[in-house]
Image (spheres, grey):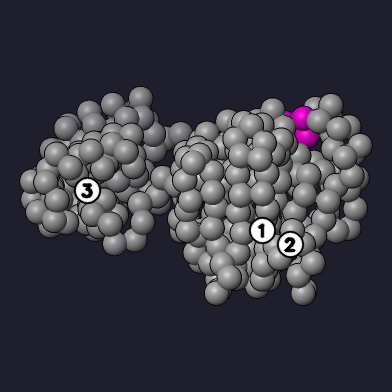
């Protein structure tokens, strides 16, 4: 028999709906408000079925065990270090639950607000693609722990503002995790290769051969991950190193250029100005901090 709640050592907070309605009329929380949050350890027989979906956007982080989610006409397995995001207000039916053999342990929250849809869109999830592999699950569960702890104290307007900020950070972190390449993938290996060779030049065919894909496939992967090409990414890494050296050392402009593999000082200055709108000397002269 499936159940929605009632798990040993669980934590569960439900904000009274009149308070939610009031929050959605106030300046900050009308953009985002946490309506429910919880922690279900080893949630045996956990399951929810919503034929019309939910008004709220649902975020679930699986930290142990296994589960599943059905939405968009497809079923997805959910394992450790995985997030499920189900967009609210779509009318799309969904179901989810724990594995019978290895019940999941989950942290979760529901949110409403005018900005929820855009935050979900930025994370790249859709009803037919609700899964996000997590890069740093501990960081995300800490955010949800903080949300739950705050709402366990009270659901005052100030507390709802505070948890709205925490939920915003949670959703934007998920959006970043969606874009970061997974460890060991060709694009992640290529990025690490370029990072380790900021002081040199790398040809696309050589880099593609190192990570075991074609040049065209690597270019496609880079565009998906960064919005730009391999050369643009390598140049951005070089310029980041140049900024660091300009800010923290007394190296001459020519020496900074050589440190990032650009021996021609004038070429380095042109590249730097193209990205930053000012010369390296003018950048260094601007007060910072």
Q: Quadrant of residue 105?
A: bottom right
- Magenta stretch, main secondary structure class: loop
What residue did someone put label 3 on? 260
What residue did someone put label 1 on? 47
How far apart are labels 1 and 3 at the CA level? 54 Å
Contact, mark 1 vs mark 3 (Cβ under 8 Å):
no
First of labels 3, 2 by sequence position: 2
Tell me which residue sits at (66%, 49%) in the image.
Answer: 49
Tell me which residue sits at (58%, 30%) in the image.
Answer: 118
Judge from the rendering whether residue 166 lies leftward or rightward of residue 100; answer left or right.
right
First of labels 2, 1 by sequence position: 2
Q: Nearer the viewer, residue 12 or 250?
A: 12
Q: Report helix, strand or loop for mark 3.
A: loop
What residue did someone put label 2 on? 3
How far apart are labels 3 and 2 at the CA level? 59 Å
- Is residue 32 among the parts visible in the rendering? no
Q: Position of residue 35 (x, y in %)?
A: 78, 44
């Amino acid at each position: 028999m499936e159940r929605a709640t009632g798990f040993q050592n669980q934590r569960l907070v439900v904000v009274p709906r009149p308070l939610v309605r009031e929050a959605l009329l106030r300046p900050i929380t009308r953009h985002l408000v946490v309506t429910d949050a919880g922690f279900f350890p080893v949630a045996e027989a956990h399951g929810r079925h919503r034929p019309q979906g939910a008004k709220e956007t649902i975020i679930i982080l699986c930290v142990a065990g296994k589960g599943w989610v059905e939405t968009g006409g497809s079923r997805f397995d959910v394992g450790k270090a995985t997030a499920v995001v189900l967009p609210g207000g779509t009318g799309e039916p969904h179901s989810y639950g724990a594995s019978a053999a290895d019940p999941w342990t989950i942290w979760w929250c529901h949110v409403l607000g005018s900005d929820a849809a855009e935050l979900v869109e930025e994370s790249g999830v859709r009803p037919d693609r609700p899964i996000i592999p997590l890069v740093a699950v501990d960081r995300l569960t800490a955010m949800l722990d903080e949300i739950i702890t705050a709402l366990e104290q009270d659901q005052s307007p100030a507390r709802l503002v505070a948890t709205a900020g925490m939920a915003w950070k949670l959703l934007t972190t998920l959006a970043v995790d969606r874009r970061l390449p997974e460890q060991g993938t060709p694009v992640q290996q290529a990025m690490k290769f370029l990072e380790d060779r900021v002081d040199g030049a790398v040809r696309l065919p050589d880099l593609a051969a190192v990570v075991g894909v074609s040049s065209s496939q690597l270019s496609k992967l880079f565009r998906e991950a960064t919005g730009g090409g391999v050369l643009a990414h390598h140049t951005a890494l070089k310029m980041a190193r140049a900024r660091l050296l300009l800010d923290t050392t007394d190296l001459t402009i020519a020496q900074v250029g050589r440190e990032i593999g650009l021996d021609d000082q004038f070429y380095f200055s042109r590249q730097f100005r193209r990205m930053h709108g000012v010369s390296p000397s003018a950048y260094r002269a601007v007060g910072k901090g």
